[in-house]
Amino acid sequence: MHRVLGDRRAIAILLGPALLVYSLIMLVPIVWSLGYSFTKGNTIDGFTGNGVANFSRLLDDPSVHESLWFTLTYAAVVTVGQVVAGYLLALLYVFFLKKSSALIRTLAFFPVVLPTVAVGLLFQKFFQVAPQTGPVNSLLNAVGLESIDFFGSAGSAFWVLIVMDIWRSMGFYAVLLFAGLVDIPDEVLESARLDGASGLRLIRHIVLPLSLPVLMSSLIFSINGTLKVFDSVVALTNGGPGNGTTPLTLYMFQTSFTYSDYGYGSTIALLLTVVCLLVSLVVYRVSRRDITEG
Amino acid sequence: MSLRMPRVRRARLSLFTAGTASLALLTTACSGGGGAGSSAAPKEFSYLSVTENTTVKTALTTLSKGACKSANDALPLKVETVPQASLDQKLQLLAGQDALPVQFAAGNAPALTQQLAKSGKVADLEKELKALGVLDQLEPAAVSTIKALYGGKVEVLPYEYNIEGIFYNKKLFQENGIAVPGTWDELVAGAAKLDAKNIQPFSASGQQGWPITRLVSTYLYRSLGPDALQKVADGKAKLTDPEYVKAAEEVAALGEKGYFGKGVGSIDYDTAMNQFLNGKAAMFYMGSWALANVSDAKQNKVGAENVGFMPFPAVAGGKGSIDQYPSNVGLGITLGAKSFDKKTGAWASCIADNYGSTALEDHGSISGFKVNTEVKDANEVTTQVRDTISTSKQNVLWFEALFSTKATTVSQTNAAGLVAGSMKPEQFMQTVQDALAAQ
Amino acid sequence: MAIDTPVKTAADRRPSGTTGSPRRARPSRRPWVKIVVTLLLVVEIYPLIWMFLTSLKSNDDYLNNSTWSLPTTWEWGNYSEAWTTGHLGLYVQNSLLAVLPALALMLLLGTAAGFALQIMVWKGRSLTLLVFLAGMMVPPQMILLPLFTVYFQAGLSGTLWPLVLTYTGTGLPLTVFMMATYYRTVPRELFEAATIDGAGILRAFWTISVPLVRNALLTVGLVQFFFIWNDLLIALTFTNNQDLRTIQVGLLNFTGDFGATQYGPLFAAICINVFGTLLIYLFLNQKVMKGLTSGAVKG
């Protein structure tokens, strides 16, 4: 039975090209970059061996600690925000909107399609306090509150970033989770309702557990993306004020290319990769029983 | 029935293929230079710069069709631009491949230019220009500024030569009975008067950061003398020394009183310029490149005759003098070492002879090249600035001039915090000093 | 060859509610639903309207008047300026040339790999799948310098090939993962049966499995399309000259091309980009919604 499915030549033909491209474009450069992390220098001055000095520097560097902390908090908040907002929207689509659901789904998906440069500029103008009072500050003024300089402090800039990214991708997660919710068999819902469950209780005890697999996938997908955030931050604050909103990716980019220390930059990238791996592994284990089954 | 290679052989084959591919890649990695040939003579006068700088590329294009047509025929001009934020990255990548263009903007900070020069990527301009007989086409003031910035060597061409000072709105000054301040205290008093009448005293771009750190550095030059920041670069003084922190405190005090208006951290360069040219702010610390905007009737709503230029005031009891104008050569543009041949030399001579007048006439931009044809000034303030440039004897630099790239970034990104009050003066100086020490 | 596929996709099922069961008779009459939906629409759509209005303002208007206000003069010229001086036409072309081949290649290679990893049986396939997954963990900044070196040495620098190759390479992990996941729902016996009749496994892959995973292909295709269409970092790094710029890089360069930032043409360029992408999206929307709701991401 397995002779056909174990045909080596076929496997080579099917898998080979993908594996080849992947190795050349991703694997080899990764290993190469790893090599750089044991060196000091840059493309202009050349590279000299540096042993593990970069790694010990990594442990002591306060900027790395700040960036790591920022990356983790950002990823956590945005992931929860995106998935929860998406889930709520999905619930709205499935349970409360019937015919108009397709239109609303499409409209909510729009922001996903926008280029980051545009969204960054948009939110800069929306939250600005000078030279014009932006719409958000106008709203605050209208209810009697003072205008806030959102980009003047790392804390408020962080929240603008969060709002921007959640606004952008909640439509996407809504559709993803909608797919999972729609799969819940009608019969199960019927019988639960007949038993008297309704509204929140229905959601908590029936819908939630049954949509767990798709929730988990969304979580992994989201965490992976948010840990590596780059474009959004550069478009909105460029890591400012100071380096208050600098994630590891941006810090790595600056170190490698602006501060001309490519070796150390590679070390930072390695740190980020390890963090991604660990987090994904944890979530993955929790969600899947056996990844090789099937 | 199916073609099944023995497993071992198949594994070996795939290993072999993967191995060869990787080996090929690694060889290219280690072999370094000699790729798409830069040892061959250049086929075009390739010029890489930043998108934000339009004057130079437009002026060069004009020259390529006019005065430098013969040089252009031999080696056609080709302009490429990248956003300023990715210039350093591009330079690093190209330098690594030995593929730098014939002429390029040499980095966002002098430190990068010096790195490139040290590894032999930048032509020895003093020698080359002397050999071409055009070294005297460079204004002496410009040459001395360049040498001060680049460790005594002429590593860039003075496509721009700028002095900095405070542009002010004459009408607002007159209406409020403010005379041109000669000292820092008079300046602050004048600002207080304006603020009392609800006029924003200063316009500055906190988003860029450097307009604010310029105030700190020029204060330092006035109070401690023209070598104030060289001492820091040499390690003889620290930014955290009390006399240095005082400068930060004075500037922070201006911010605290609200003299920069609201949300200074989000004001970008164009907005700050616009605020001044629309009469919304009374004073604007900027360099002479802003004359182009001042002379543009579309941008300048208060009128060029209403704009004055004053030197940064003196500090009572300070060692510096009011005639020491902070100066710079704009974005340093240089010529590559390997690609400097006869044709490049022809271009260089032509530029040295003609750029000065072309830039001034077409764009109101003052460069460090001598102006060989008579150009009429657009307005009074331009004449004033030009005269000041030609008579200035000693010039000073700016805050980040002698900093590493990291310290430059740290300083510029934290400047807004200094005037917004979120960063105390000692803290600001400490942060920058730490970044300086880190390299 | 009629194959009785036991695979039921949710596309065959309507979203619950149109089955006519009496349970959800009231929802649309609840006022709070209407409020939530209106709020949602405002939050989603208002920024787009704002962008459109801003694109019609002159620079003066934008800098000096309130952000809420309508344009004082309707500068439709901003759009033609964006297209001509801003070379938007060229950039659109470059984006298409870089993105579409990469997408096609990615889907083709990814599906084949997914098939090999999920349906075919051989030792080491779970390890290989993990190797692909590991690629999703890596920040793209890490591979920029080595790739730049390789492309330069290979003489590809003056072309769009670096973009196409890099997009394909970086898109493969996710594609392989999603296709492999989707193939889980397709039983192996299907292919056993097919090959008994003499068709090779490769033909079975192409003629049988690909149509089955059509929905997943569309989903992954759309998701990846927007990832790489909106990519900035890779495009910025590997485009060495103006003729190769993609739209996103072009947008960044608008600042200087006009001297002081001309916000009108900048927003006009953004609007052209956005509305163009929206058109593509709307066109594919039907298919994708079906694809997503057919269990492509069942976990």
Image: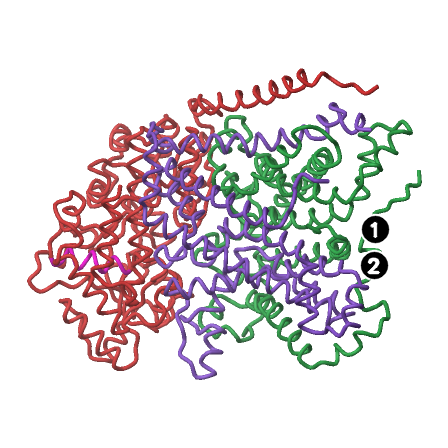
Chain colours: A purple, B red, C green
User: Which quadrant, please, contains the N terminus of chain A?
Assistant: top right
Q: Which residues are magenta?
A: B212-223
> Is residue B356 in sight in this rendering?
no
- Neighbour class for label 1 at 10 Å: few (<14), some, many (≥20)? few
Residue at image mark 2: C13
Q: Amino acid at mark 2?
A: Arg
Closer to us: B350 or B212:
B212
Amino acid type of the residue that numbered disc 1 sits on in the rendered structure? Lys
Identify the residue position indicated by label 1 in the image.
C8
Mark 1 in CB contact with mark 2 (< 8 angstroms): yes
Q: Quadrant of the C terminus of chain A?
A: top right
- Residue B411, position as x, y percentages in the image: 28, 53
In this picture, is B341 found above or below B147?
Answer: above
Crowding around mark 2 (Cα neighbors within 10 Å: few <14, some 14 to 19, many 20+) is some
Query: The residue tagged with tag 1: helix, strand or loop?
Result: loop
Relative to residue B223, is residue B282 drawn left or right? right
The quadrant holding residue A24 is top right
Q: Specify whether A273 is left or right of A257.
A: right
Q: Is residue A12 left or right of residue C169?
A: right
Q: Residue furthest left?
A: B317
Instruction: From the image, give the main secondary structure of the stretch colored magenta.
Output: helix
Q: Residue at x 13, y 62 (%)?
A: B314
- In the image, A286 versus C74, the foreground residue is A286
